[in-house]
Every structure is written in C-alpha cells, then in structure tokens.
Amino acid sequence: MKNLHGTDRETMAWINLYGVLGLLEELCRTDDEARKLTADASVSIGFAVRNGPEGTLSFSGGTCTLQKDVSSCMIKLPFSSPEKFNGMIDGTVTPFPSKGFFKLGFLLHSFTKLTDILSSYLKPTEEQLKNRQFFETGTTLMLYLVAVAVAECGNHDKIGKFSAGYIPDGTICLAVKDGPAAAIVCKDHTLTAVKSRPAEWTASMEFDSFETARSLFDGSANAMNCIGDGSIRCAGLMSMIDNMNRILSRVGLYLG
C-alpha cells in the first residue's frame, strides 16, 4: 500500500530492520550505557516479517551483531506484515513472541532501553547536540543509517530500483573528512551497504565536516548546493554519484 509520498511499507520494513535496528551493532561499540546494558547478556532476538525482511540481533558480552536470518534466534518475533513490523518501530504495535518466552526479561527491559538510547541519537534535542561527543556519535550513526537506507531503497523501492538500474558495478564511498565512512557496493544493480571505509572505491562523496554531513542528513542542506560551495567533495565516476543522489532523495521521504 502506498502513502502520499509514493513510499511503501515493504521498503520501510527493510530500512527499519537492517538500517535502524542494525545500528544497535554500532551503538554497543560506541555508547558506554549501551555496552553496560549488554555486558552480561547472552541472548538473540529474531524478527521475521511476512513478505519482508528477517534478521537476528545477537547480544553477548557488551556487543551486538546482526545476521540476516532467524535460524538460530532464542526469541522469535513474527510479524504478519511489514506494516505490523513498522508499527513496532513506531511504538504502535506490541509484538508477541512465538519462541523464547523465558528470555522476555531482556526484551522488555534492556532491549527497550537500548532502543531508547538509539532514538536519542537519531532524534536529539538541541541541548544534547551541544555535547560534541554526542553530536559526532549521532552523526556517525546517521551516516551508517543513510548508507543502509540507500541500499535498501535501491533494492526495494520502485523509483529507487529504477535509479539503481543505472549504477554500474563498483563501490561508492560516503565519508566525513578525517572521520567515519561507509560504502555502498553495487553488483548487478543490487546494492549492499558496508559500515566501514572501503579499501578502494569507484566514486566518492566526502563531507568536509560532521556539521555538513548532519545538515544533509537532516534535510537542512541541499546536496547540490553543498557540492557547489565545496563543502561536499565528489570524485570518481560521477554517474554513480548522480544516481545515488536520486535514491538519496527517496531515502529522505522514508527517514524524514
């Protein structure tokens, strides 16, 4: 079912699982409170969305890893539709586990606290953004989210797939100068996000600062204007950047 922006719930589910919940991997690496919440954990939560994605978040010794299946999860949360899964992310749907009832303490307490911490980084207050470490951590998480969202939008959104069809095989690097980086790898017009700096790239988009990156991600800046004034530097095969930017405009509708 489509909404007024032409976005669809299926694509949103892929972005929510691999993009939003996938950020818990990085959150447990970078946030002290998140690491403490999972320090004594040994549990995995599987999300199975009918006609959508599936994945398992595994928590152990202060770390979190995401795998794209539910074959070995301890707690399994099934969703009858992408809409129901998106509702869980929005806080309007309460899932009921089909497996792992005796592990629900972690799901109801620590996991909820983890998602609250993540939300504070993705939707911060002005006061929180005054803390430089918080600002940079949040912007890094947004960089990773945008990279995954571009990949999922290019693979599943009708308009995004059209643009991905014009991207040749290769790697696009998204980076903050002297800071974090992510990659979008294209193979046979299928996009895969990698949340690390690639050893080699075909095209590159580099932000001159965390401030520039955040302003683009939160919609307060226009990519073409930033390229024009030099605050975003592009290099390599420009057709890849052009088509990625078209997908990025779609991503803004999903994440806005």
Image (cartoon, rainbow, N blue to C red):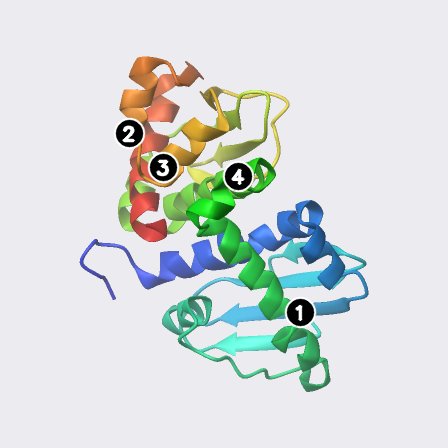
The alpha-carbon separation of the residues under discs 2 and 4 comes to: 20 Å
SS of the residue under disc 3 = helix
The alpha-carbon separation of the residues under discs 4 and 3 comes to: 31 Å
Earlier sequence position, callout 3 versus callout 1: 1
Left/right placement of residue 177 relative to residue 70 reads left
The amino acid type of the residue labelled 1 equals: Ser
Residue at x 53% of width, y 77% of height: 78
Residue at x 37% of width, y 61% of height: 10
SS of the residue under disc 2 = loop
- Circle 2 packing at 10 Å, graded few (<14), some (14-19), many (20+), is few
Residue receiving disc 4: 135
Closer to the observer: label 3 or label 1? 1
Closer to the observer: label 4 or label 3? 4
Q: Quadrant of residue 82?
A: bottom left
Q: Which mark is residue 222?
A: 2
Residue receiving disc 1: 110
Earlier sequence position, callout 2 versus callout 4: 4
Left/right placement of residue 32 relative to residue 153 reads right
The alpha-carbon separation of the residues under discs 3 and 2 comes to: 21 Å
Earlier sequence position, callout 4 versus callout 1: 1
Closer to the observer: label 2 or label 4? 4
Residue receiving disc 3: 164
The amino acid type of the residue labelled 3 equals: Ala
